[in-house]
Amino acid sequence: MNWWIPPRHFAPPLLDEEGKPPNTSLPRRGGVARGPAIVFLLTLLLASTLAVSQTTSRGNAAMDRDLMEVTIPKLQAMYASKKYTVTQVTRWHLDRIARYDGVYKAVVRVDTTGALAAAEAEDAAAKSAGKDFRRDPLWGIPIVIKSNTSVKGLVTNNGWKGYTLPGHELVAPQDASVVSKLKAAGAVILGQTNMPDFAASDTNLSSVFGRTGNAYDWRFSPGGSSGGTVTAVTANFAVLGTGTDTGNSIRMPSGTSAVVGVLPTRGLVSINGIHPLDWLLDNTGPIARSVTDAAIALDVMAGEDPKDFRTGGAAAKAQPGPYTRYLKTDALKGKRFGVPAFIVKETGPGLLLRPETREMFMKALDGLRAAGATVVTDPDILPEFFEALVNAVNTRAYVREGTEHFLRDFGPAEYRSVDAYERAAGTPLPPVVTGSGGGQQVPIPQRILEDDPGADAAFWDPQRRALAAYEEALDRFHLDGFAYPALQMPSNDETVPQPDGRPSSGPHSNTAWVNPIGVPAVVVPGGFYATGMPFGIELSTRPWKDGDLLGWAFAYEQATRHRNPPMLITATGRAK
Protein backbone atom coordinates (compact mmCIF):
# COMPACT_ATOMS: atom_id res chain seq x y z
CA MET A 1 0.00 0.00 0.00
CA ASN A 2 1.38 3.41 -0.96
CA TRP A 3 1.05 5.97 1.79
CA TRP A 4 1.83 9.66 1.65
CA ILE A 5 4.30 10.31 4.43
CA PRO A 6 3.60 13.71 6.04
CA PRO A 7 6.01 15.85 8.00
CA ARG A 8 5.17 15.86 11.69
CA HIS A 9 3.80 19.42 11.59
CA PHE A 10 2.28 20.97 8.49
CA ALA A 11 -0.45 23.38 7.39
CA PRO A 12 -3.62 21.61 6.27
CA PRO A 13 -4.12 21.81 2.48
CA LEU A 14 -7.00 23.85 1.09
CA LEU A 15 -9.15 20.87 0.14
CA ASP A 16 -12.79 19.98 0.56
CA GLU A 17 -14.00 17.01 2.64
CA GLU A 18 -13.27 14.65 -0.28
CA GLY A 19 -9.74 15.94 -0.58
CA LYS A 20 -10.44 17.93 -3.79
CA PRO A 21 -10.00 21.66 -4.50
CA PRO A 22 -13.26 23.47 -3.75
CA ASN A 23 -15.41 24.38 -6.75
CA THR A 24 -16.50 28.00 -6.42
CA SER A 25 -17.96 28.55 -9.90
CA LEU A 26 -21.67 29.27 -10.42
CA PRO A 27 -23.86 26.61 -12.05
CA ARG A 28 -24.08 26.96 -15.83
CA ARG A 29 -25.94 25.13 -18.56
CA GLY A 30 -24.59 24.91 -22.08
CA GLY A 31 -21.80 27.26 -21.12
CA VAL A 32 -24.24 30.17 -20.54
CA ALA A 33 -25.47 31.40 -17.16
CA ARG A 34 -29.27 31.36 -16.80
CA GLY A 35 -31.39 34.48 -16.35
CA PRO A 36 -31.51 36.88 -13.39
CA ALA A 37 -34.30 34.95 -11.66
CA ILE A 38 -32.24 31.79 -11.58
CA VAL A 39 -29.23 33.73 -10.36
CA PHE A 40 -31.38 35.29 -7.62
CA LEU A 41 -32.72 31.88 -6.52
CA LEU A 42 -29.25 30.39 -6.56
CA THR A 43 -28.02 33.31 -4.46
CA LEU A 44 -30.76 32.70 -1.90
CA LEU A 45 -30.03 28.97 -1.89
CA LEU A 46 -26.31 29.55 -1.48
CA ALA A 47 -26.91 32.02 1.37
CA SER A 48 -29.24 29.57 3.12
CA THR A 49 -26.78 26.70 2.67
CA LEU A 50 -23.90 28.80 3.99
CA ALA A 51 -25.96 29.84 7.03
CA VAL A 52 -26.80 26.21 7.85
CA SER A 53 -23.21 25.17 7.20
CA GLN A 54 -21.86 27.91 9.47
CA THR A 55 -24.32 26.97 12.23
CA THR A 56 -23.35 23.30 11.90
CA SER A 57 -19.67 24.20 11.89
CA ARG A 58 -20.09 26.31 15.02
CA GLY A 59 -21.92 23.40 16.68
CA ASN A 60 -19.21 20.93 15.65
CA ALA A 61 -16.50 23.29 16.81
CA ALA A 62 -18.20 23.63 20.19
CA MET A 63 -18.42 19.84 20.55
CA ASP A 64 -14.79 19.52 19.54
CA ARG A 65 -13.77 21.99 22.24
CA ASP A 66 -15.91 20.27 24.85
CA LEU A 67 -15.16 16.64 24.01
CA MET A 68 -11.49 16.67 23.02
CA GLU A 69 -9.58 15.36 26.05
CA VAL A 70 -12.82 15.19 28.04
CA THR A 71 -12.64 13.38 31.37
CA ILE A 72 -15.31 11.21 32.94
CA PRO A 73 -16.24 13.82 35.61
CA LYS A 74 -16.50 16.58 33.00
CA LEU A 75 -18.61 14.46 30.67
CA GLN A 76 -20.89 13.42 33.51
CA ALA A 77 -21.34 17.10 34.40
CA MET A 78 -22.32 17.88 30.81
CA TYR A 79 -24.89 15.11 30.89
CA ALA A 80 -26.27 16.36 34.19
CA SER A 81 -26.70 19.87 32.77
CA LYS A 82 -28.28 18.39 29.61
CA LYS A 83 -25.68 20.06 27.42
CA TYR A 84 -25.31 16.86 25.40
CA THR A 85 -27.07 13.54 25.12
CA VAL A 86 -25.27 10.22 25.22
CA THR A 87 -26.25 9.70 21.59
CA GLN A 88 -24.62 12.97 20.56
CA VAL A 89 -21.41 12.13 22.38
CA THR A 90 -21.37 8.61 20.99
CA ARG A 91 -21.87 9.88 17.44
CA TRP A 92 -19.03 12.39 17.92
CA HIS A 93 -16.63 9.60 18.85
CA LEU A 94 -17.87 7.32 16.04
CA ASP A 95 -17.41 10.16 13.55
CA ARG A 96 -13.89 10.69 14.81
CA ILE A 97 -13.05 7.03 14.29
CA ALA A 98 -14.52 7.17 10.77
CA ARG A 99 -12.50 10.27 9.91
CA TYR A 100 -9.08 9.28 11.19
CA ASP A 101 -8.82 5.55 11.80
CA GLY A 102 -8.23 4.74 8.15
CA VAL A 103 -4.71 5.97 8.83
CA TYR A 104 -4.10 4.63 12.34
CA LYS A 105 -6.08 1.35 12.26
CA ALA A 106 -6.70 1.23 16.00
CA VAL A 107 -10.26 -0.12 15.95
CA VAL A 108 -10.64 -3.47 14.22
CA ARG A 109 -14.43 -3.60 14.62
CA VAL A 110 -16.66 -0.56 15.08
CA ASP A 111 -19.99 -1.63 16.56
CA THR A 112 -22.01 1.38 15.38
CA THR A 113 -25.37 -0.35 15.75
CA GLY A 114 -24.67 -1.64 19.25
CA ALA A 115 -23.13 1.63 20.46
CA LEU A 116 -26.00 3.80 19.23
CA ALA A 117 -28.59 1.39 20.60
CA ALA A 118 -26.94 1.52 24.02
CA ALA A 119 -26.66 5.32 23.88
CA GLU A 120 -30.28 5.78 22.85
CA ALA A 121 -31.45 3.44 25.61
CA GLU A 122 -29.52 5.46 28.19
CA ASP A 123 -30.98 8.72 26.90
CA ALA A 124 -34.46 7.25 27.07
CA ALA A 125 -33.92 6.00 30.63
CA ALA A 126 -32.68 9.42 31.75
CA LYS A 127 -35.63 11.19 30.13
CA SER A 128 -38.13 8.79 31.65
CA ALA A 129 -36.70 9.10 35.19
CA GLY A 130 -36.49 12.88 35.08
CA LYS A 131 -34.92 14.64 38.03
CA ASP A 132 -34.78 11.40 40.03
CA PHE A 133 -32.35 9.80 37.56
CA ARG A 134 -29.07 8.58 39.06
CA ARG A 135 -26.12 7.93 36.76
CA ASP A 136 -23.81 4.96 37.22
CA PRO A 137 -20.04 5.59 37.36
CA LEU A 138 -19.46 5.10 33.62
CA TRP A 139 -22.92 6.14 32.41
CA GLY A 140 -22.65 7.42 28.84
CA ILE A 141 -18.87 6.99 28.68
CA PRO A 142 -17.69 5.77 25.24
CA ILE A 143 -15.10 3.03 25.60
CA VAL A 144 -13.24 0.47 23.49
CA ILE A 145 -12.46 -3.14 24.35
CA LYS A 146 -9.31 -5.03 23.38
CA SER A 147 -10.27 -7.75 20.93
CA ASN A 148 -9.08 -10.66 23.07
CA THR A 149 -11.82 -9.80 25.58
CA SER A 150 -15.23 -11.38 25.00
CA VAL A 151 -18.12 -9.08 24.08
CA LYS A 152 -21.33 -11.04 23.58
CA GLY A 153 -22.26 -11.30 19.92
CA LEU A 154 -18.94 -9.97 18.60
CA VAL A 155 -16.00 -11.98 17.28
CA THR A 156 -13.21 -12.40 19.81
CA ASN A 157 -10.61 -12.32 17.07
CA ASN A 158 -7.61 -12.08 19.42
CA GLY A 159 -5.69 -10.56 16.52
CA TRP A 160 -5.58 -13.94 14.75
CA LYS A 161 -7.15 -14.65 11.36
CA GLY A 162 -7.87 -18.24 12.44
CA TYR A 163 -10.72 -16.99 14.64
CA THR A 164 -12.28 -15.08 11.74
CA LEU A 165 -12.48 -17.90 9.20
CA PRO A 166 -15.86 -17.64 7.43
CA GLY A 167 -18.26 -20.04 9.10
CA HIS A 168 -15.87 -20.66 12.00
CA GLU A 169 -15.74 -17.27 13.70
CA LEU A 170 -15.20 -17.17 17.45
CA VAL A 171 -18.41 -15.31 18.28
CA ALA A 172 -18.60 -14.69 22.02
CA PRO A 173 -21.62 -16.41 23.62
CA GLN A 174 -21.37 -14.15 26.67
CA ASP A 175 -19.48 -11.15 28.01
CA ALA A 176 -16.18 -11.40 29.84
CA SER A 177 -16.57 -10.58 33.52
CA VAL A 178 -14.99 -7.14 33.13
CA VAL A 179 -17.21 -6.36 30.14
CA SER A 180 -20.30 -7.25 32.17
CA LYS A 181 -19.12 -4.86 34.89
CA LEU A 182 -18.39 -2.06 32.42
CA LYS A 183 -21.78 -2.43 30.77
CA ALA A 184 -23.55 -2.51 34.12
CA ALA A 185 -21.78 0.73 35.04
CA GLY A 186 -23.23 2.41 31.95
CA ALA A 187 -20.28 2.35 29.55
CA VAL A 188 -21.06 2.52 25.82
CA ILE A 189 -18.87 0.10 23.88
CA LEU A 190 -17.84 1.59 20.54
CA GLY A 191 -15.92 -1.41 19.28
CA GLN A 192 -12.90 -3.66 19.59
CA THR A 193 -9.28 -2.62 19.23
CA ASN A 194 -6.53 -4.11 17.13
CA MET A 195 -3.82 -6.25 18.70
CA PRO A 196 -1.06 -8.62 17.55
CA ASP A 197 -1.94 -12.30 17.15
CA PHE A 198 -2.62 -13.78 20.61
CA ALA A 199 -1.09 -10.67 22.24
CA ALA A 200 2.31 -12.22 21.64
CA SER A 201 4.30 -9.27 20.30
CA ASP A 202 5.79 -5.95 21.34
CA THR A 203 4.50 -4.36 18.15
CA ASN A 204 0.86 -4.07 17.06
CA LEU A 205 0.66 -6.05 13.82
CA SER A 206 -2.18 -8.54 13.47
CA SER A 207 -3.08 -11.10 10.82
CA VAL A 208 -6.68 -9.86 11.09
CA PHE A 209 -6.32 -6.12 10.60
CA GLY A 210 -2.71 -5.28 9.85
CA ARG A 211 -0.59 -2.68 11.58
CA THR A 212 -1.69 -0.02 14.06
CA GLY A 213 0.23 3.25 13.89
CA ASN A 214 1.19 5.52 16.75
CA ALA A 215 -1.17 8.49 17.03
CA TYR A 216 1.78 10.88 17.45
CA ASP A 217 3.25 9.72 14.13
CA TRP A 218 1.57 6.86 12.27
CA ARG A 219 4.92 5.61 10.98
CA PHE A 220 6.01 4.75 14.52
CA SER A 221 4.89 1.81 16.64
CA PRO A 222 2.44 2.24 19.51
CA GLY A 223 3.83 -0.96 21.00
CA GLY A 224 1.92 -4.10 21.79
CA SER A 225 -0.11 -5.81 22.59
CA SER A 226 -2.61 -3.16 23.73
CA GLY A 227 -1.46 -0.78 21.01
CA GLY A 228 -4.91 -0.53 19.46
CA THR A 229 -6.45 0.61 22.73
CA VAL A 230 -3.73 3.16 23.55
CA THR A 231 -3.97 4.64 20.06
CA ALA A 232 -7.76 4.87 20.27
CA VAL A 233 -7.68 6.50 23.70
CA THR A 234 -4.84 8.95 23.06
CA ALA A 235 -6.44 9.93 19.72
CA ASN A 236 -9.76 10.68 21.44
CA PHE A 237 -11.62 7.91 19.62
CA ALA A 238 -12.88 6.86 23.08
CA VAL A 239 -12.68 8.18 26.62
CA LEU A 240 -11.03 5.02 27.93
CA GLY A 241 -10.43 1.41 27.04
CA THR A 242 -9.31 -1.97 28.31
CA GLY A 243 -5.92 -3.53 27.90
CA THR A 244 -4.39 -6.84 28.84
CA ASP A 245 -0.87 -7.48 30.07
CA THR A 246 1.12 -10.74 30.15
CA GLY A 247 4.56 -9.16 30.19
CA ASN A 248 4.24 -5.37 29.56
CA SER A 249 1.26 -5.11 27.21
CA ILE A 250 -0.71 -2.41 29.03
CA ARG A 251 2.27 -0.50 30.32
CA MET A 252 4.71 -0.41 27.42
CA PRO A 253 2.16 0.85 24.84
CA SER A 254 0.89 3.41 27.34
CA GLY A 255 4.44 4.73 27.57
CA THR A 256 4.61 5.22 23.79
CA SER A 257 1.38 7.20 23.63
CA ALA A 258 1.13 9.58 26.62
CA VAL A 259 -1.70 7.75 28.38
CA VAL A 260 -2.17 6.21 31.80
CA GLY A 261 -2.02 2.42 31.89
CA VAL A 262 -2.90 0.47 35.03
CA LEU A 263 -1.77 -3.08 35.76
CA PRO A 264 -3.67 -4.03 38.94
CA THR A 265 -2.51 -6.45 41.59
CA ARG A 266 -3.18 -9.88 40.08
CA GLY A 267 -6.46 -10.99 41.59
CA LEU A 268 -7.98 -7.54 41.95
CA VAL A 269 -9.67 -7.83 38.52
CA SER A 270 -11.02 -11.02 36.95
CA ILE A 271 -9.58 -12.27 33.66
CA ASN A 272 -12.54 -14.61 33.07
CA GLY A 273 -13.58 -14.34 29.43
CA ILE A 274 -10.28 -12.98 28.15
CA HIS A 275 -8.48 -15.21 25.67
CA PRO A 276 -5.27 -16.19 27.45
CA LEU A 277 -1.73 -15.95 26.22
CA ASP A 278 -0.40 -17.37 29.48
CA TRP A 279 -3.22 -17.35 32.03
CA LEU A 280 -0.90 -17.46 35.05
CA LEU A 281 0.70 -14.22 33.91
CA ASP A 282 -2.25 -12.51 32.19
CA ASN A 283 -3.95 -9.51 33.71
CA THR A 284 -6.32 -6.74 32.60
CA GLY A 285 -6.77 -3.10 33.50
CA PRO A 286 -7.89 0.30 32.27
CA ILE A 287 -6.14 2.65 29.85
CA ALA A 288 -7.14 6.31 30.07
CA ARG A 289 -5.92 9.84 29.42
CA SER A 290 -5.95 10.75 33.11
CA VAL A 291 -5.30 9.03 36.41
CA THR A 292 -8.75 10.08 37.63
CA ASP A 293 -10.47 8.30 34.76
CA ALA A 294 -8.29 5.22 35.27
CA ALA A 295 -9.19 5.15 38.98
CA ILE A 296 -12.92 5.39 38.23
CA ALA A 297 -12.64 2.58 35.70
CA LEU A 298 -10.61 0.37 38.03
CA ASP A 299 -13.30 0.73 40.70
CA VAL A 300 -15.80 -0.66 38.21
CA MET A 301 -13.58 -3.47 36.95
CA ALA A 302 -12.36 -4.73 40.34
CA GLY A 303 -14.06 -7.43 42.38
CA GLU A 304 -14.08 -11.09 43.26
CA ASP A 305 -15.23 -13.57 40.64
CA PRO A 306 -15.83 -17.28 41.34
CA LYS A 307 -14.75 -17.96 37.75
CA ASP A 308 -11.23 -16.64 38.45
CA PHE A 309 -9.76 -18.31 41.53
CA ARG A 310 -7.00 -15.69 41.77
CA THR A 311 -9.62 -13.11 42.82
CA GLY A 312 -10.61 -15.14 45.90
CA GLY A 313 -10.36 -13.03 49.05
CA ALA A 314 -9.58 -9.86 47.06
CA ALA A 315 -12.15 -7.80 48.93
CA ALA A 316 -10.34 -8.38 52.22
CA LYS A 317 -6.85 -7.81 50.79
CA ALA A 318 -7.46 -4.74 48.63
CA GLN A 319 -7.43 -1.18 49.89
CA PRO A 320 -10.96 0.13 50.35
CA GLY A 321 -12.51 2.09 47.53
CA PRO A 322 -13.34 4.22 45.79
CA TYR A 323 -9.87 4.63 44.34
CA THR A 324 -10.48 8.32 43.74
CA ARG A 325 -10.13 8.80 47.52
CA TYR A 326 -6.36 8.30 47.14
CA LEU A 327 -5.96 10.96 44.45
CA LYS A 328 -4.29 13.84 46.26
CA THR A 329 -1.82 16.32 44.84
CA ASP A 330 0.51 15.91 47.83
CA ALA A 331 0.47 12.10 47.76
CA LEU A 332 4.18 11.94 46.81
CA LYS A 333 5.42 14.04 49.70
CA GLY A 334 7.73 12.01 51.92
CA LYS A 335 7.57 8.92 49.70
CA ARG A 336 10.70 6.99 48.70
CA PHE A 337 11.22 5.24 45.37
CA GLY A 338 14.04 2.92 44.39
CA VAL A 339 15.38 2.50 40.86
CA PRO A 340 15.77 -1.20 39.91
CA ALA A 341 19.46 -1.72 39.14
CA PHE A 342 18.93 -4.41 36.52
CA ILE A 343 16.77 -2.07 34.40
CA VAL A 344 19.17 0.89 34.31
CA LYS A 345 22.47 -1.01 34.15
CA GLU A 346 24.86 0.36 31.52
CA THR A 347 26.70 -2.85 30.60
CA GLY A 348 26.13 -6.58 30.52
CA PRO A 349 23.68 -8.95 28.89
CA GLY A 350 20.04 -8.16 28.22
CA LEU A 351 18.22 -5.15 26.87
CA LEU A 352 20.11 -2.02 27.89
CA LEU A 353 18.57 1.40 28.32
CA ARG A 354 19.06 3.63 25.27
CA PRO A 355 20.97 6.88 26.02
CA GLU A 356 18.08 9.12 24.98
CA THR A 357 15.71 7.10 27.16
CA ARG A 358 18.07 7.34 30.12
CA GLU A 359 18.09 11.12 29.66
CA MET A 360 14.27 11.23 29.64
CA PHE A 361 14.13 9.01 32.72
CA MET A 362 16.47 11.31 34.64
CA LYS A 363 14.19 14.24 33.83
CA ALA A 364 11.15 12.23 34.93
CA LEU A 365 12.86 11.46 38.25
CA ASP A 366 13.37 15.19 38.71
CA GLY A 367 9.61 15.50 38.40
CA LEU A 368 9.14 12.95 41.18
CA ARG A 369 11.55 14.84 43.40
CA ALA A 370 9.86 18.16 42.66
CA ALA A 371 6.56 16.63 43.78
CA GLY A 372 8.09 15.75 47.16
CA ALA A 373 9.47 12.22 46.66
CA THR A 374 12.95 10.89 47.38
CA VAL A 375 14.62 8.77 44.70
CA VAL A 376 17.12 6.13 45.84
CA THR A 377 19.66 4.53 43.52
CA ASP A 378 21.86 1.66 44.67
CA PRO A 379 23.33 -1.34 42.81
CA ASP A 380 21.70 -3.63 45.36
CA ILE A 381 18.14 -2.46 44.62
CA LEU A 382 16.73 -5.32 42.53
CA PRO A 383 20.03 -6.37 40.91
CA GLU A 384 20.36 -8.96 38.14
CA PHE A 385 19.95 -11.72 40.72
CA PHE A 386 16.34 -10.58 41.19
CA GLU A 387 15.71 -10.90 37.46
CA ALA A 388 17.00 -14.47 37.61
CA LEU A 389 14.55 -15.26 40.44
CA VAL A 390 11.64 -13.97 38.37
CA ASN A 391 12.75 -15.96 35.33
CA ALA A 392 12.63 -19.13 37.44
CA VAL A 393 8.83 -18.84 37.70
CA ASN A 394 7.70 -21.52 35.22
CA THR A 395 4.25 -21.20 33.68
CA ARG A 396 4.74 -22.86 30.29
CA ALA A 397 3.56 -26.29 31.46
CA TYR A 398 0.10 -24.86 32.14
CA VAL A 399 -0.52 -22.75 29.03
CA ARG A 400 -2.90 -25.17 27.34
CA GLU A 401 -5.07 -25.37 30.46
CA GLY A 402 -5.91 -21.68 30.15
CA THR A 403 -6.76 -21.98 26.46
CA GLU A 404 -8.95 -25.02 27.09
CA HIS A 405 -10.87 -23.27 29.87
CA PHE A 406 -11.43 -20.20 27.70
CA LEU A 407 -12.76 -22.16 24.72
CA ARG A 408 -14.94 -24.28 27.03
CA ASP A 409 -16.70 -21.22 28.44
CA PHE A 410 -16.36 -18.58 25.72
CA GLY A 411 -15.92 -20.48 22.49
CA PRO A 412 -18.75 -20.88 19.96
CA ALA A 413 -20.91 -24.02 19.98
CA GLU A 414 -18.84 -25.41 17.09
CA TYR A 415 -15.68 -25.67 19.16
CA ARG A 416 -15.31 -25.72 22.92
CA SER A 417 -11.78 -27.15 23.08
CA VAL A 418 -8.44 -26.98 21.30
CA ASP A 419 -9.04 -30.29 19.53
CA ALA A 420 -12.57 -29.27 18.51
CA TYR A 421 -11.25 -26.08 16.96
CA GLU A 422 -8.69 -27.99 14.95
CA ARG A 423 -11.33 -30.42 13.69
CA ALA A 424 -13.75 -27.65 12.77
CA ALA A 425 -11.31 -25.25 11.15
CA GLY A 426 -8.94 -27.81 9.68
CA THR A 427 -5.94 -25.98 11.08
CA PRO A 428 -4.15 -26.14 14.44
CA LEU A 429 -4.03 -23.45 17.07
CA PRO A 430 -0.54 -21.92 17.28
CA PRO A 431 1.91 -23.43 19.79
CA VAL A 432 2.10 -20.17 21.71
CA VAL A 433 -1.31 -20.91 23.27
CA THR A 434 -1.10 -24.70 23.41
CA GLY A 435 2.44 -25.16 24.78
CA SER A 436 3.32 -27.50 21.94
CA GLY A 437 6.56 -25.78 21.01
CA GLY A 438 6.97 -23.87 17.78
CA GLY A 439 9.64 -21.43 16.70
CA GLN A 440 12.63 -21.91 18.96
CA GLN A 441 10.60 -23.27 21.87
CA VAL A 442 10.84 -26.93 22.83
CA PRO A 443 7.46 -28.62 23.39
CA ILE A 444 6.65 -28.88 27.08
CA PRO A 445 4.36 -31.62 28.44
CA GLN A 446 1.18 -29.87 29.46
CA ARG A 447 -0.31 -30.34 32.91
CA ILE A 448 -3.22 -29.10 35.01
CA LEU A 449 -2.01 -26.70 37.68
CA GLU A 450 -4.52 -27.78 40.30
CA ASP A 451 -3.64 -31.48 39.91
CA ASP A 452 0.09 -31.23 39.27
CA PRO A 453 2.24 -32.50 42.16
CA GLY A 454 5.10 -30.48 40.67
CA ALA A 455 3.21 -27.17 40.68
CA ASP A 456 4.85 -25.94 43.87
CA ALA A 457 8.35 -26.54 42.54
CA ALA A 458 7.59 -25.11 39.08
CA PHE A 459 5.36 -22.14 39.85
CA TRP A 460 4.27 -21.36 43.40
CA ASP A 461 7.59 -21.64 45.24
CA PRO A 462 9.62 -19.63 42.64
CA GLN A 463 6.89 -17.01 42.67
CA ARG A 464 7.04 -16.74 46.46
CA ARG A 465 10.84 -16.41 46.39
CA ALA A 466 10.79 -13.67 43.73
CA LEU A 467 8.05 -11.73 45.54
CA ALA A 468 9.94 -12.04 48.82
CA ALA A 469 13.07 -10.57 47.19
CA TYR A 470 10.98 -7.70 45.80
CA GLU A 471 9.50 -6.91 49.19
CA GLU A 472 12.84 -7.37 50.95
CA ALA A 473 14.28 -4.56 48.81
CA LEU A 474 11.37 -2.33 49.79
CA ASP A 475 11.99 -3.08 53.44
CA ARG A 476 15.78 -2.85 53.41
CA PHE A 477 15.90 0.51 51.63
CA HIS A 478 12.76 1.83 53.34
CA LEU A 479 11.01 2.28 50.01
CA ASP A 480 7.36 2.85 49.19
CA GLY A 481 7.79 1.70 45.61
CA PHE A 482 9.97 1.52 42.52
CA ALA A 483 10.33 3.91 39.57
CA TYR A 484 11.73 2.98 36.16
CA PRO A 485 11.20 3.63 32.42
CA ALA A 486 8.16 2.03 30.82
CA LEU A 487 10.39 1.23 27.81
CA GLN A 488 14.11 0.76 27.26
CA MET A 489 13.96 2.76 24.03
CA PRO A 490 11.85 5.30 22.15
CA SER A 491 9.09 4.12 19.85
CA ASN A 492 10.57 3.03 16.53
CA ASP A 493 9.76 4.01 12.94
CA GLU A 494 8.30 0.89 11.34
CA THR A 495 8.31 2.24 7.77
CA VAL A 496 12.09 1.98 7.47
CA PRO A 497 14.32 -1.11 7.72
CA GLN A 498 15.15 -2.04 11.29
CA PRO A 499 18.81 -2.16 12.42
CA ASP A 500 18.91 -5.97 12.27
CA GLY A 501 17.25 -6.09 8.85
CA ARG A 502 14.17 -7.90 10.13
CA PRO A 503 10.62 -6.51 10.40
CA SER A 504 9.91 -4.39 13.43
CA SER A 505 9.14 -6.32 16.60
CA GLY A 506 9.40 -3.40 18.98
CA PRO A 507 9.71 -1.16 20.83
CA HIS A 508 10.82 -3.15 23.84
CA SER A 509 10.69 -2.83 27.60
CA ASN A 510 12.27 -4.54 30.58
CA THR A 511 9.13 -4.70 32.71
CA ALA A 512 7.84 -8.26 32.18
CA TRP A 513 9.12 -9.18 35.65
CA VAL A 514 6.06 -7.54 37.22
CA ASN A 515 3.61 -10.20 36.00
CA PRO A 516 5.13 -13.35 37.54
CA ILE A 517 5.00 -11.80 41.03
CA GLY A 518 1.58 -10.20 40.55
CA VAL A 519 2.33 -6.73 41.91
CA PRO A 520 0.56 -3.57 40.70
CA ALA A 521 2.15 -1.03 38.37
CA VAL A 522 1.07 2.12 36.59
CA VAL A 523 2.49 4.12 33.69
CA VAL A 524 2.08 7.90 33.53
CA PRO A 525 3.14 10.33 30.79
CA GLY A 526 6.69 11.41 31.59
CA GLY A 527 7.48 13.89 28.84
CA PHE A 528 8.39 13.95 25.16
CA TYR A 529 11.56 13.13 23.28
CA ALA A 530 13.07 15.75 20.97
CA THR A 531 11.39 13.85 18.11
CA GLY A 532 7.95 14.61 19.55
CA MET A 533 7.31 11.01 20.62
CA PRO A 534 6.12 10.35 24.19
CA PHE A 535 8.07 8.89 27.11
CA GLY A 536 6.39 7.09 30.01
CA ILE A 537 7.52 6.50 33.59
CA GLU A 538 6.36 3.40 35.48
CA LEU A 539 5.78 3.03 39.22
CA SER A 540 5.17 -0.20 41.15
CA THR A 541 4.57 -1.11 44.76
CA ARG A 542 3.48 -3.88 47.13
CA PRO A 543 0.59 -6.20 46.27
CA TRP A 544 -2.87 -4.80 47.05
CA LYS A 545 -1.63 -1.22 47.43
CA ASP A 546 -3.34 -0.15 44.20
CA GLY A 547 -4.97 2.88 45.81
CA ASP A 548 -1.66 4.27 47.06
CA LEU A 549 -0.12 3.63 43.65
CA LEU A 550 -2.84 5.58 41.87
CA GLY A 551 -2.42 8.39 44.38
CA TRP A 552 1.28 8.70 43.56
CA ALA A 553 0.53 8.58 39.83
CA PHE A 554 -2.05 11.33 40.26
CA ALA A 555 0.35 13.55 42.21
CA TYR A 556 3.02 13.11 39.53
CA GLU A 557 0.51 13.79 36.76
CA GLN A 558 -0.75 16.97 38.40
CA ALA A 559 2.75 18.23 39.19
CA THR A 560 4.16 17.67 35.70
CA ARG A 561 1.14 17.78 33.34
CA HIS A 562 3.03 16.07 30.53
CA ARG A 563 -0.08 14.88 28.69
CA ASN A 564 -0.41 16.56 25.29
CA PRO A 565 -2.81 15.20 22.63
CA PRO A 566 -1.49 14.19 19.20
CA MET A 567 -2.23 16.00 15.95
CA LEU A 568 -3.98 13.46 13.74
CA ILE A 569 -4.05 13.26 9.96
CA THR A 570 -6.61 11.87 7.54
CA ALA A 571 -5.78 9.81 4.47
CA THR A 572 -5.72 13.08 2.49
CA GLY A 573 -3.17 14.57 4.82
CA ARG A 574 -5.49 16.92 6.68
CA ALA A 575 -4.41 17.69 10.22
CA LYS A 576 -6.58 17.97 13.33
Image: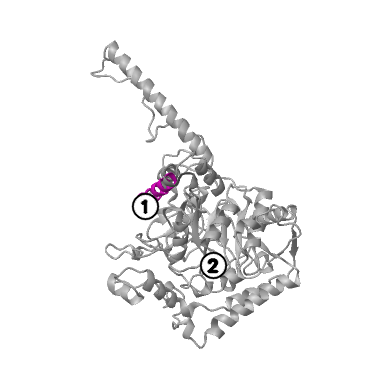
Most prominent secondary structure in the magenta stretch? helix
The amino acid sitting under disc 2 is Gly
List the residue tagged with mark 1.
114
Query: How was the colour assigned to the protein in this rendering?
Result: one colour
Compared with 395, 140 (above or below) is: above
Look at the numbered disc 1 and give the secondary structure of its residue: helix
The residues bearing labels 1 and 2 have C-alpha atoms spaced at a distance of 32 Å
Q: Residue furthest bottom?
A: 453
Answer yes or no: is residue 499 visible.
no
Q: Nearer the viewer, mark 1 or mark 2?
A: 1
- Residue at 36 percent of width and 75 percent of height: 418
Who is closer to the viewer here, 219 or 416? 416
What span is in magenta?
Answer: 110-127
Query: In the rendering, at what x and y percent does residue 436 appear?
Result: 41, 78
The amino acid sitting under disc 1 is Gly
Compared with 429, 452 (above or below) is: below
List the residue tagged with mark 2.
247
The quadrant in which residue 166 appears is: bottom left
